[in-house]
Image (cartoon, rainbow, N blue to C red):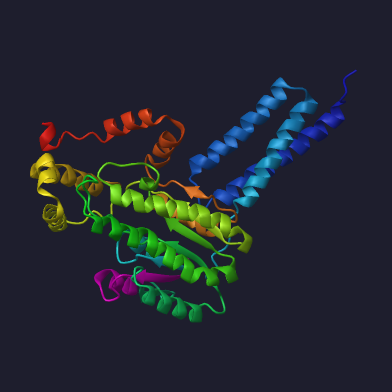
Amino acid sequence: MTPFSWEPELLLLGVTVVLGGTALYKFKKSQSKTMSSPVVICHSALLCLWGAYCFSSLSIFWGWTLFSMACCFSLAYSSSQEMLPVDGKAVLITGGDSGIGHVLSKYLDELGFTVFVGVLNEKGPGAEALKKSCSKRTSVFQMDITNPTQIKEVQARISEKVKHTGLWAVINNAGILGTLADGELLPMSIYRQCMDVNFFGAVEVTKAFLPLLRKSKGRFVNISSMAGIVPMKLFSAYCSSKAALTMFSGVMRLELKKWGIKVVLIHPAGFRTNIGGTTERWVKEENDILENVSPDVLEVYGRDYLRSSTWATHQQLNDSPADFSPLFTDVLHGILCKNPSALYTAGAFSYLFICLISFFPASVFDYVALKIFYSRFLPKALT
């Protein structure tokens, strides 16, 4: 005689169907705004396959038990991934003159957020374009993040505007690429400039707006870079500053938990913006290096190598994908998700390279990186 008669078996089957259906519905509903259909389909398929395996390979009791546990875990996960309503939530974005900060400001405005945008030049073309294209919910402020006085002034003005609704999120986006060249060739002023904007500026903004986020139990979204973890040739100043921002974000994530503030770190891969600059800027940066480098070092590298290697890299930046949607999806998830991830890797190969540097020997990473970012240009002394 079997331990289960047909009536209890039907009851268990009914409970299983309800659990599985509820888990799939909750997951699809919670992810519909932030994840693509293939991801939802993949999760649903995995849950169905697990259920098929449990009931085909195990007894009714153990099959029902293990599948029920999987459904419970799925329900718990989907609940933590539920999206909060926009409801006029106020966010601050730095670096809105151009690039990611500019298009992100428009995107969040279209979704119904109250958007405060800090720009380097309040009367520049980027700021004027935001004022014309965005709704009245968006305000543009003069805020050079390397200028503590301007940061304090904007903090006071935003405090007055959000005293009834609160400030929900601060997106530390402002950043510069700096000059591209071998680390030995870069003047110290470039290292200091990258640190001032990409790291110290973000720290200054974070400290200034922490009291407002403490009231709302909101979140910081720090847009670092894949270069904050992955070493990249010719990017020594940029990589170093983004690595500092990455570590700062991790420390603040731990320290701010007691206040109910979440810290989200985003490591984008390359996207097509004007961060690489124009040909005129490349010429100026090249001349700055030539004026500052010692004659013996210049003799080792040669003028031809300096131009050929850096200009080729700039051109690769200009050929990066122009579709910002993967980054926008991650930013929105970081802002609105009930329990956002600590790290997002937006764009092609970002997560792959982070895994490569994190889990493989350095020799493996070096081999792959040198093969992918191969350069046929060599310093004069090596030719």
Q: Residue at x 45, y 36 (%)?
A: 358
Q: Nearer the viewer, residue 267 or 36?
A: 267
Please provide percent x and percent y for residue 159.
50, 78
What quarter of the picture does the C terminus occupy?
A: top left
329 displayed left or right of 68: left
User: Which residue is most to the right?
Assistant: 1
49 displayed left or right of 115: right
139 displayed left or right of 317: right
User: Which residue is most to the top?
Assistant: 1
Please provide percent x and percent y for residue 280.
13, 58
Q: Residue at x 63, y 35 (%)?
A: 47
For residue 323, say whether it is visible. no
Q: Nearer the viewer, residue 308 or 352?
A: 308
Would you say residue 112 sits in the magenta stretch?
A: yes
Please provide percent x and percent y for residue 58.
74, 22
Please provide percent x and percent y for residue 377.
15, 36
Q: Which residues are magenta?
A: 107-133
